[in-house]
Image (cartoon, rainbow, N blue to C red):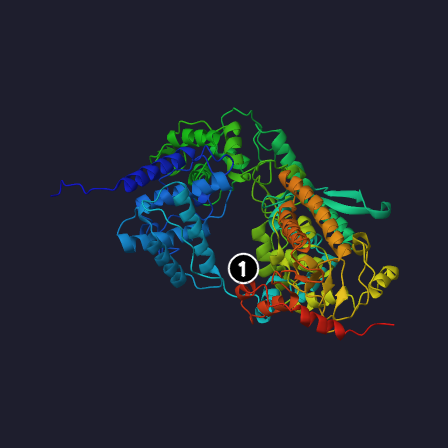
Amino acid sequence: MSDVVDFKPKAEVEAAEQLERFIMWAKATLPKGIPHQVHAGIRWDMSSWHYSGFNGASFTALGSPRNAKQDQRRYMQCSFADFAKAFLVHRRVFQRKKDVKGVLYSLRALEKALLELTQKDDVTQVSTAVCYRAAEVIQAHWTKGNSPYVISKNIEKIIDLLNNKRLLAKPFRWKSPIRQNKTDTLKQQKKDREKKLPSPDSLRALGELFNNKLDNPVDIVVTSACALLLSQPSRVGELADVEYDPIVYMEGENDEKRMFLRWYSEKGFGATVKPVIAGMEPIVKRLIERMHSISTEARAYAAWLEDHPDEFPPHEGVPNKGLDDPLTYAEACSALKVSVSGKHSYRSKFRMNFLSSLAKKKSLGSAAQAVLNEIQDGWDTGKGKQIYVKDMIGCQGYMFDDKALITLRKLNILMREKYLPKYFPYTTAPEEGKARVKYRDALFTVYTGQLNTDGQTSLAPFGVEIAANPNRMTVQLSSSGDKKSIFERHGYKGVKVNTHAFRHELNTEMHRAGLSQLLIDAFSGRTSMGSVYNHETVEERTQAVAAVHPKTKQSSAESRLEKVRTNEPLRLRDVTELAEGSQDRVIHQTHLGLCVHNFASEPCPKMGSCLRCGNLACVKGDDEKLKNIKEERAYLQKRYSDAIAADSRGEFGASVWVVKVQNDLLKCDELIKLLENPELENGAIVWNADDGWNLTNNAAAMAGLVDPQVLEANAQTALPSLDELSAMMDEIDIEA
C-alpha cells in the first residue's frame, strides 16, 4: 500500500505547478532583479535575510524565541518558507515595499493556522477557515493597540496575491474580521496628542540648548538637526540628503524673497524645495554655520576618498612604499592604525582586529572578497617555526610561511570595504529618478566616531557617517540603556521627545493656521492625504468654523446682500465673489434655492457646501435659480475636465479633486433633470439629497457616541413637506 499515490484534483495540480513557477521566478530574480536593494551575497537557503538587504527578515516560526541561540530557534517549514521568500521578493520588485516585519508576522500566523487545520505546509491549501484561524492566532499573540488589525490586513494582501497568481487549489476572497480600535473619542484624542506631539518642556529645552554656547559636537548636531526639522515638516532619515548649502530664495508676493531648502522627501515624493516657516530663517542660517564648523574636514576627506579610489589614505603611520610593494605585518598594522601591545604579535593583531571582522560580513564586494580569499588561502595555520637569536635566552618569536603578499593596494580595497558606508560616495540608497547627495556635499557628514557624549574625539579609522542618523537622534532625545540623552546631560529631568513628533507638531500648527490638507501634504512631502498628522481638537475645529460663519464674519459686499433682503434674484458670479453677510433667518435664499438651516442655533453644518446638504430646497419654476444651477454645472464641468487632465499628467492631489468635483457634477445633473421635468408643477419643492456628513455628527463620532457606519447608512433623513415649509416661511420676521 505504500506505493499507492493518492488522486489529486486537476485544480490542485495546477495550483501546485503555479506555485513552483512562482518560487522559481523569485529565485531567478534574487538578487539580480533588485539592484541596489539586496546584497550580492544573498542566498535563497539562508534562514535570515536581515543582513542581506531585507531588514528584519528572519524566517522563524511563530513563537520561536526572539533572542534564542541559533540551534534553539524554530523555523518555517521548507515549502511555506519558500513561498514566504517569494512573496517578499515580489513585494520588493513590483511594489518597492521595504517593510518586512509586519508581513512576516502575518505569514507566521498563517503558517501556524495552516499546519493546525491541514497538517501540511502547502500554501495552495489555504482556505477561509485557515484565514479565520490565523486571525484568532493574531489576536491571541499580538494584543497591543491596533497591531492585530494591521497584521490581519496583511493576510488580505497575501490572499490577493494567491488568487491573482492562481496559487490556490480553491480560490476565495477573504476580509479580516478584526476591526480597528476606536481612537477618535475625545479621551483618546487627548492621549494621541500627548503621545504624538512634542511636549512644551521638550521644545523649551531644545530652544534653550540651541541658544546656549555648546562645546560638545554631539550637542551641536542634535540641536541643529531638531531646529532643521522644526523649520519645515520632514523625517529624520531625510537629513542624510541635506546639502551643506541647501538654501535657495524665491520671490513671493510684493517681490518679497522667501527662504526655501533643497530637499529630498522619502516615501515617493522625491526631490523638492520646501519653504522655511516664517521666523525660522535666522535659525536655519545659524544651524548651517554650526554644522559647517563640524563637517568641513570630514567632507574634504570624503572628497579625497572619492577622487582617489585606488590610493590608501595618507597619514603618519603609512609606510613610505609603493602601492604594490610588500609590507610586513608591523607596517600593515601601522597603516591600518591597529595598535599592538602585550603578548599579541603584529600578525595575530592583523588577523584578529582586521581580517576576522571582514570575514564575518554577510556580503563583500567582489574585489574585497578576492583579496580576502587570497590572504586566507595563503595563511599558515600551523603553530609556526620558533625563532632563536644568538646570545639571547629562549624563543624570540615564531616564523610563519604565509603565501600571500600584503600591499597598500590590497589594504586599500579591504579598508574601504570595512570602514566606508554601504552606498559611499552617496549618503543613501539609489532610487529611480532620485538626485542623490554625496558625503562630500552633505551637511551632516562627520568622521565615523567623531561624536560621543563626553565631548572627546574617538575616531574609528578611515570612515565617514551622517551625524544626524536615526539611531543617534533616538538615543540623544530619549536615552537608551546606560547612554544619557542630551536632556539628561544638561539637567532636564524627565524630558524626552521623538523626531517624528516635530512633523506632527508642524502639521497640526498648519491646520490651525487654516492651510488646506492638500497644501499641507505638499509642504510635508507626502503623496497621500496626511490627516493623521492633524491633532487639532474638536473644539479648535469648531472655533475655526465659527470664525467664518455668516453671523461672525463681516461682509465686504453689502450691495449684493440687498438683493437677498429684497428677494431679488442673484447671479452666480454675484455669489462666487460674495462673502457671506449677517443672514440669520430660519429660511433664506442661496444662489441655488432656499436654505432651511437655522443659523441662530449653530453654524453651517456643511461649511457652505450646498450641493451636499439636505437643507437645500430648489423651487420648480424659479428660472433664475435654475439658470444658476446650470452655470454651476458648466463651471464644475470645466473643473472636472481640468482635474481629469491633471490626473492623467500625474499632478499631485489631482485624483482627490476628480472624485469631489465628479460628485458635485452628478448632483447638478440630477437637480436640473428634476427642475425641468414638465410633470412637476411650478412651486413644487425639490429637496437635495444629504451625504450624511456634518460637524455635529462628526464630533459625535469622534467622541464615540455614534457609530460612523450608522451615519453613513442613514445619510438621507426625512425632509419637511411643502406645507411644513410654508408654515416655517410664515414665521419669518421680515426686516424693514
Q: How many marks?
A: 1
Quadrant that contains the C terminus: bottom right
Could you say where residue 604 lies in the image, as x and y percent from the top left?
71, 66
SS state under label 1? loop
Please identify the quarter of the rendering in which residue 128 is found.
bottom left
Q: Is residue 364 left or right of residue 74?
A: right
Vertical arrangement, residue 130 with respect to residue 357, above or below: below
- At x 48%, y 29%, the residue is 367
Q: Residues within 10 Å of mark 1 (few under 14, many from 20)?
A: few
Please identify the quarter of the rendering in which residue 378 is found.
top left
**Mark 1 belongs to which amino acid?**
Ser
Report whether residue 248 is seen: yes
Report whether residue 467 is seen: no
In this view of the protein, which residue sits in the foreground, 363 or 552? 552
Q: Is residue 653 left or right of residue 587?
A: left
- At x 51%, y 31%, the residue is 413
Quadrant that contains the N terminus: top left
Vertical arrangement, residue 603 with respect to residue 632, above or below: below
Read off the residue under disc 1: 480
In this view of the protein, which residue sits in the foreground, 227 or 71? 227
Could you say where residue 23 lies in the image, as x and y percent from the top left?
36, 38
**Residue farthest left in this picture:** 1
Could you say where residue 120 lies in the image, as x and y percent from the top left?
27, 49
Q: Is residue 22 left or right of residue 294?
A: left
Vertical arrangement, residue 104 with respect to residue 647, above or below: below
In this view of the protein, which residue sits in the foreground, 132 or 323? 132
Could you say where residue 121 lies in the image, as x and y percent from the top left?
30, 48
- At x 72%, y 45%, the residue is 261
In this view of the protein, which residue sits in the foreground, 407 or 278? 278
